[in-house]
Amino acid sequence: MPNVGDMNGKAALVTGAASGLGRATALALARAGADLCLVDLNAAGLAESARQVGELGRRAHIHAADLGLPGQCGAAVAAAIAAFGQLDALCNVAGIIIFAHSPEMPAADWDRTLAVNLSAPFFLCQAAIPHLLARNGAIVNVTSAAAFIGEAYVAAYCASKAGLTQMTKALAMEFINQPIRINAVAPGGMMTPMGGTIRLPEGADRALIKRFTPLRGLVEVDDVAELIAFLASDAARGYHGACINIDNGITAG
């Protein structure tokens, strides 16, 4: 695992923090010494994440929000500033995936996928960047192996994650001469609550789905969380505009 830098005296905002990779990321940052603003739609899950952060001796502020609504992205950043007076890292972990036969995918599902997976990270970055510049801070976006390989029945998800990958690089170039680091991680399949809610469309060809199942198995959630926390810390000072694949080789060929 990466050697996460000292985050004592720093504050981080983590989206999707009620469970899964978001909670694991929050705990990795807390172990490194950061205080956390935890953001998710699931208020009960946020409370449990905050409890676990508190057990590690760090402060946690919870903020329930639907990040698919642009105005709530700015409000989440404002909540972090109100709670801690600063923001040193933004970790955009929240995401959704909806399987569908593309000709039958409802417009609402397409729009919701792009709103949560692509637009929300942009609006969170937009609100956070002025504060991060003041602190020589960092942004870490969670994209996916699906940004690099075509996956059947998830056209919206692939499009949103490919867009997020390129958005990360575009922002990195825009701020190449300013004191902020902007990077992404691209996990492969993980065993998370989001994965447990996947429902395949009727008549889906399972052989096509198996094509994007890694031969080495699923990625460990804690390994991805540690990588995110590393990129959020000063230990990753040499990283800017990078998208690091952590997918057990699924994108290798």
Image (cartoon, rainbow, N blue to C red):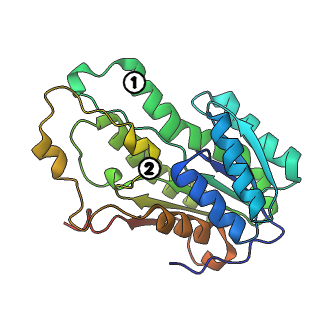
**Residue type indicated by callout 1:** Asp
Estimate the x, y position of residue 210 in percent, counting from the top left: 17, 50
What SS does tag 2 mark? loop
Res 156 → quadrant:
top left
Alpha carbon distance from label 1 to label 2: 21 Å
- Residue 251, compared with residue 157, is above or below; it is below
Q: Could you tell me which residue is drawn at 80 percent across and 65 percent down? A: 57
Residue assigned mark 1: 109
Residue type at mark 2 is: Thr
Residue drawn at 29 percent across, 37 percent down: 154
Position above or below: 230 against 86: below
Say which residue appears at 75% left-offset and 67% top-offset: 136
Residue annotated with mark 2: 192
Looking at the image, which residue is at 14% across and 41% down? Answer: 206
Answer above or below: position of 131 versus 40. below
Dot 1: what SS? helix
Instruction: Give the class, few, some or many, for how many residues have Cα within 10 Å of label 2's Cα (few <14, many ≥20).
Output: some
- Image side of residue 186 versus residue 80, left or right: left
Q: Is residue 8 left or right of residue 13?
A: right
Tell which of 133 and 76 is nearer to you.
76
In the rendered image, residue 237, in percent from the top left (x then y), is placed at: 63, 77
Q: Quadrant of the C terminus?
A: bottom left
